[in-house]
Every structure is written in C-alpha cells, then in structure tokens.
Image (cartoon, rainbow, N blue to C red):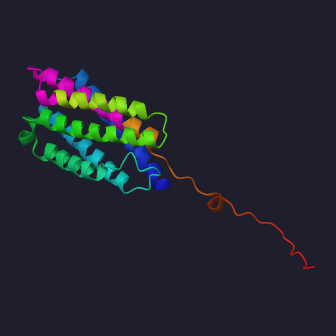
Amino acid sequence: MRWIRSIKVSFIAVSVVLIALGLWLLICPGVSSAAICVALGAVSVLYGTIKLLGYFSNDLYRLAFQFDLAVGILSIILGMLLILRPDAVLSFLPTVIGVFILVDSILRFQTSIDARHFGMDKWWAILLISCVGAALGVLLLFRPFESALAMIRLIGLTLMIDGTENLMTCLYTVKVPRRSCADRTVVEADFTEAADD
C-alpha cells in the first residue's frame, strides 16, 4: 500500500512539474533551445520512470497505468535523446511532442471509457481533457505557426494540458487498496464451549 501511495504522490508531483514547465514555455518562449531540450529531457525521463513504476504497482483498478509500459520506455528514450543529442531532435521537436501527446491522449481516452465502466463519476472529465490534448497534439503535427516563439508557446500549452490530463487521471482512478480489518487489529474474545445435551 505504501508503494502505490508513493507512486501516486510521485505521479502527481511529475504532473505538476509538467504543468509548470508548460507554463514556463508559454510565458517565456524566448529561452534558449538548449535549455528547452534539457528541461524537457529531464522531465521526460522522470515522467517515464514514474510510469514504469506505476505499471508494476498494485493499483486497485489498474486504470491509470495500464498502458504505461510502452509509454514509459518511449518517454525515457525521448528524454535521453533530448539531453544527449538536442541538436538532432530540435528540428523536429514539435512533431515528436505532437505524436507523443496524441498517443498519450488517445490512451487516456481509453482510460476514461474504462473508468465509466467501473462507475467512476469523473470519467467525463478525463474524456474531455484527453480530447483537448489530442487536438493540440494534432495541431503540433501540422505546425500552424511560422514563428518559432508561437510554436514554443503552443508546445507549452500542450504540455500544460498533458500534465493536467495525467493529474486528473491519477487523482480520479488510482486507488490505494485498504488494509483489511484482520491486518489492522486482532480481536480477542473469551468463549465457553457449550455442553452437549
């Protein structure tokens, strides 16, 4: 239980960092390309690691992390490329992020449908935010802006939506199994054997 609780807290923290990174790019799009790559790479590696740990956790419903084995591995690989070879990735960074966000949003769309089958009240919120994330991912693929600053702002907005998407999924679908009463307390009682008639 402590393990899945720790994973949940870590996933929430990474989602908040992702939102903060997106907000940073949205407000300050003029930062250097190297700084963007290192920041994105570090968050991507951390994000992928948490996803892998979540996949192997004992989440009660197994909704939030059900697709995260492949996504976690890809996220770590992408993060390492951003850190070690930023020059090779920078030219097609919007496309890479667009594909990654699109795939992640489609998987979260599936999670929302599964959450509905489990009877969870907030499944529609996950569905809505995953549709917004998918739309922004597609927008990044088409590169609608000529300006580099506008593209960085779009990347920032997309990261904020993806972080919110993961945060909502984690908060609404990750359930920590409760310990049974037998595990928490031992009830002692006196008894008297009834005599046979």
Residue 104 at least partly seen: yes
Residue 160 at least partly seen: no
Majority secondary structure of the magenta segment? Answer: helix
Q: Which residue is painted at 35% across and 38% down in the image?
A: 166
Q: Which residue is painted at 83% across and 69% down in the image?
A: 190
Determine whether 191 is above or below 122 in the image: below
Q: Which residues are magenta?
A: 140-166
Q: Based on the displayed image, in which of its 4 quarters is residue 149 positioned?
A: top left
Determine whether 153 is above or below 108 in the image: above
Which of 8/196 is in front? 196
Q: Looking at the image, which residue sits at the far bottom?
A: 196
Is 123 within the magenta? no
Determine whether 62 is above or below 169 in the image: below
Which of 91/129 is in front? 129
Determine whether 157 is above or below 89 in the image: above
Which of 181/88 is in front? 181
Q: Based on the displayed image, in which of its 4 quarters is residue 146 positioned?
A: top left
Q: Which residue is painted at 45% across and 55% down in the image?
A: 3
Q: Which residue is painted at 23% across and 28% down in the image?
A: 135
Which of 124/96 is in front? 124
Q: Position of residue 92 (x, y in %)?
A: 9, 35
Q: Position of residue 194 (x, y in %)?
A: 89, 75
Q: Position of residue 160 (x, y in %)?
A: 30, 29
Q: Position of residue 62 (x, y in %)?
A: 41, 50
Q: Looking at the image, which residue sits at the far front?
A: 197
Q: How many marks?
A: 0
Query: Can you say which quadrant of the picture contains the C terminus?
Result: bottom right
Is 155 within the magenta? yes
